[in-house]
Structures are given as structure tokens and as C-alpha cells.
Image (spheres, rainbow, N blue to C red):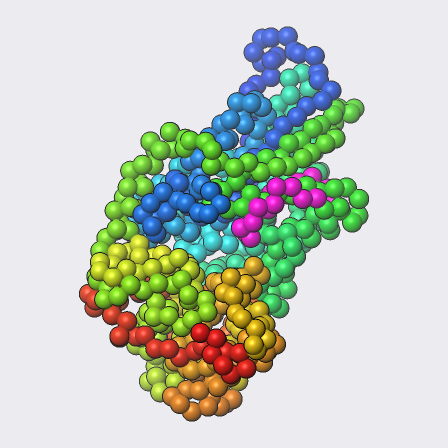
Amino acid sequence: MNRREFVKKSAVTSAAVAAAGTVSAAPAEAAGRQPEKAPRTWSFSILGTTDLHSHVFDWDYYKDAAYSDKAGNSVGVARVATLVRQQREAKGEDRVLLVDAGDIIQGTSLAYYFARVDPITGTGGKRGPRHPMAVAMNHMRYDAAALGNHEFNYGIDVLRRFESQCHFPLLGANALDAKTLRPAFQPYTVKRVRVPGAPDIKVGILGLTNPGIALWDKDNVGGRMVFPGLVEQARKYVPRLRALGCDVVFLTDHSGLDGSSSYGDALPYVENASNLVAEQVPGIDAILVGHTHVEVPSYTVKNAETGEEVLLSEPYCWGYRLSVFDFELELHHGQWKVTDKKAQTLNPNGVDEDPEIRELLEADHELVVKYVNTAVGTCTADLSAADSCWRDVPIMDFIHKVQADTVKAGLSAADAALPLISVAAPFSRTADIPRGSVTIKDIAGLYIYDNTLYGKKLTGAQLRDYLEYAAKYYHQVPAGTAVDTATLTNANSFWDYMYDTASGVSYDIDIAQPEGSRIRNLTYEGAPVADDQVFVVAVNNYRANGGSGYPHIASAQVAYSSTNEIRQLMIDYVTTKKTLDPADFAVTNWKLTQAGTPVF
């Protein structure tokens, strides 16, 4: 379907929308039976998942083993599917809807395999395979899903192909065509809950995605799509759903509920705006929340205009939890009114995986297991990331080496004369490249995101600002006070993936000092870095486009860019050299201090 056809299709009459949203059997009259006595009350449920990130089975591809963590969680929609089936059996097939809040097609080796190795878009004129998440979610009979920001990581063509494989709409009321400012995806859907002998309950489901896509995936969406704020678009569409006669208005937001943003003032819209939508837009009954990877079983926000309570729930991520929204309604003068609503989260770790999903996708899973266990070379020493958040460790220098070498090879003659440095974050404290054989999963476990590579120009003064911003990752620990690594970092608000270290310059981070004055002894090749000195900085696309709110980098001049994933560049490095030897790249160039005294 082209965009013009989509716009025409999205402008169907309310009657057609309602018909398309029917979720249950025909009324008794159509079957030749006497109509049942009209009930005065009715109940139904909406089940919600979010941030599944292509976790189908309870499996960790980086460890090549069943998933496990200290909390005893399980992952994957295969287990969630069993909970969904149990809910339908307990409450009735006609009384349960199933919705997702986004970030579906990125996040595991399974996701990467079907985006890049054997892409769903096909290669060489051949039609691509079906995405495992489309297969699983179709089997589970999802009614709708919001677009997540990571849906755009592999480009719009992959996303459109995934969309075409789904038997449910991908909703994004604030994902607009950049030229026409019309919806690029379906904004909402209307579902009907059948009530014997009474009017159907009409449920409007509005999908909202994250404005940060404009920054984080600028290379994929720039000039093609724009992403206005959630509050702004909810104000447009919630009244429309009420005008269509919806008895219940339910939002699925790929946006957290604390009103925060990780991109500073780079965008005029709030990143985590679900609480603001609830507070500022009247007419909403409940919101399924996503994006922030936390568990919020039940949370209420009072709407400032109506005083009505809006119910919110966020079911963690990866299939850790399933949100359950239960609604009670009464029929008044032919119209249903919500009289009670509650939410909770269910843990699927105590149920078995759905055997039909296992049968449908076992072969795809085994393909990916074989792929990630492919050996690409050997390593001369064990490289662990366990201390990477407070020490300069060789495994991080491996990332810096690949980034710097790649950018250097792609610079113009003029820019090649500038000093070159690299910045990168410790994505996983559990990553480990073992001594001996090195496989794809070993490298993928270190670099878990599908980031691409940039080279951007910063002055010495801007570089210092950049490193000061990174240094707020640490709590202030006065000189003479013992440092406990368990409490050293601000990892609950300034996450590990937000913390960049630099290679190519030397510096100290004095954690005894307040934020903004911690970077000491910043030098390049033994000389103090001058404020007007110009550097080329190798940096991933997420950070280069404003991710995590670092100063200067988003607006900095581009010296190099590539569509190759950094992870694949690292795999290629080992494949080409055959041997990964820390002697080729390990340099200790930064350290933590307290009033000048090294911490470690």
C-alpha cells in the first residue's frame, strides 16, 4: 500500500472502523436464537506487553543458555502467550484484548539475524522470511501495537515489511510524513467487545511513539518522518475517538511516565510523557506504558481538567511481565460507562512456554543459535567488562580501537591531519571475551546495540564539557572516604549505556569534586588540551544525534559517517586479524581519583 492509499484508507467512516474492529462472534439474532436479556453491567480486560525486543523464547543468545537473572525472571513471548491463553480461558475469548507498547523488532541476535543476515526484506530479488515476532504475535492474536523507537533502527523498509507481516496494526499517531504531516502509520483502531442482547462496547486504542526517534534514528527518518509530542497528538485524537462513540479510550504509549527526557533541550517534546498525557488530555481511561524498562503494576494520574483518574501500567520489558487492565462498565440509557478499573502485572516465570510458538519458531531459533556460535578468531587473554564502569579495561579499548581505525580510514586528507579520539560506553558489565576461541556471540554480548559510526569535530573546550557531562555518572565521594563500587555510580538515573569513556586523550576523573569540575589533567600526547584545539571524535550514531543529552555533539560538524554497525566492524576486525590481542590496543589513559589520589 502506498502512502496515498493509506491516507484514503485511514479516512474510512466510523462505521467501517467499528466493523473492522469486531473481536467476537455475531449476535444471537443472526444465529436464529432469541436475544438474551440485556445485561446492565459487563466486564472485559486489556492485556499489555512492551519492550519485547525480539525475545521469543526464554533464551540468552549472548550466553548460549537459558535466560537467568538474580530476580528469577524469564523472558520471551512464548511464556507470555501461556498467560494470555489462561486469561482468555478464565474471562472469555470475547472479553480480552491484547496490546503492545512497542520496541518489538530490535534487541537480540534473533532480531539482528532477520534484519541483516537473512533479512525479512529479502535479498537478490528473493522474498524474505517472516519475522519471528510477527509469527509469534499473530499466533497470540494481538489487537494492536504501538511503534517503539527501536522499530526504526534497521530503516523504514524493514519496518514496513514487518508491518505488512502483522495481522494487527502498528499504531503511531505522532509518526507523521515529513512532507504532508499526515499519519505515516495508522493512528488508532476501534475494537468491539460483544455484549449479548446489548450494545457493543466500543474500545478506541490510540498509539503514540517517542519523539526521540527524530534524534536517535535521524539517519533513517530524517526528511521522511517527523515525530511531534505525545500530548499534542493525544489532544487531537482522543476527542476523535470519543466522537466515534468509543465507550473506553485506551492509549498504548512508547513513553515512560516520569516526565523526563534524556536529550536535554535538543527537542521541544518530552521523552517520557505518559503521565503528562494522562494529566493534560481529558477523556482517557487507561494507558499502557513502555520505553523505560521498569515494572509499574498500577499507577493513577488525575486529569487536571476533569478530575477523573487515569490508570497506567508498565509491564517491565522482554516479556518479564504481562499487564492486566480490568474494566467494569454499566449501561446507562444505551451507553456504556466505566464504573471501575484496576491494573496489575503478572509474572510468566511459573508457566510453560506455548508449545505452538515453540513448534512455529524452533527452526528460526536454531538458525540464530548456530549463527551466534560461529567462531571468528581467537583471543590471547580473557577480556572482562566487569570493572568497565570504573576502570580503564582492555575490553573497552577493543571498541575504541575499532572505532578509531574505521573513522581514520574514512577521513578526508584535511581531517586526517587532526587528532583522533574515540568515545564509547560500557553497555554490559557481564560481557566477557574468553581466552581461546572467539564467537559472534562473545562480541555481540559486548556491543549489544545496533549502532553505526560517526566522526564528529569537537574543540578542546567542548571535549572537556563532554567528559564533564560523562563524569556525573559517579556519586561524589569525598577524599579520605572509602569507595564502594556497589554505590559509586548513578546507574539508576544515569545508566551505564549513557556513560562514555574516551580513548586517545589522557585524563583523571576526581570524584571528590562536585559535578562540572571533575576532569583533571586532560592531555593529548602528553600536552595539555587547548580550548581551541580541534579533534575528530569517533562516536556512535545514537550519541552523535543527541542521545543521552551530551553537550555539543549533536550539532558538531560531521567528518565521517557509515551505515555499518559497530558490532559488525568489531566482528570483521577479529575475522580479519584472526587473533584478538590486547597488546595491540590496551592503553590505560583515564582513572578515577580523589583529590588527586588514584582510587584503584
In percent of the image, x 32 and y 64: which residue is there?
A: 383
Q: Residue furthest left?
A: 578
Asked whether, in this view, residue 229 is left or right of residue 154, the answer is: right
Asked whether, in this view, residue 348 is left or right of residue 208, the answer is: left
**Residue 128 in the image, given as x and y percentages of width and height:** 31, 45
In percent of the image, x 22 and y 58: which residue is there?
A: 437
In percent of the image, x 50 and y 31: which residue is there?
A: 83
Closer to the camera in the image, 53 or 415: 53
Closer to the camera in the image, 529 or 591: 591
- Is residue 52 among what the camera can see? no
Query: Which quadrant holds the N terminus?
Result: top left
Query: Which quadrant holds the C terminus?
Result: bottom left
Asked whether, in this view, residue 48 is left or right of residue 578, the answer is: right
**Residue 460 in the image, given as x and y percentages of width and height:** 49, 85
Q: Is residue 261 above or below residue 350?
A: below
Q: Is residue 539 magenta?
A: no
**Residue 407 in the image, given as x and y percentages of width and height:** 35, 75
Q: Is residue 286 magenta?
A: yes
Asked whether, in this view, residue 306 is left or right of residue 37, the answer is: right
In percent of the image, x 55 and y 82: which residue is there?
A: 595
Q: Quadrant of residue 177?
A: bottom right
- Is residue 310 among what the camera can see? yes
Q: Is residue 87 above or below residue 63?
A: above
Q: How many marks?
A: 0
**Residue 228 in the image, given as x and y percentages of width and height:** 61, 57
Start-end of magenta stretch = 282-300
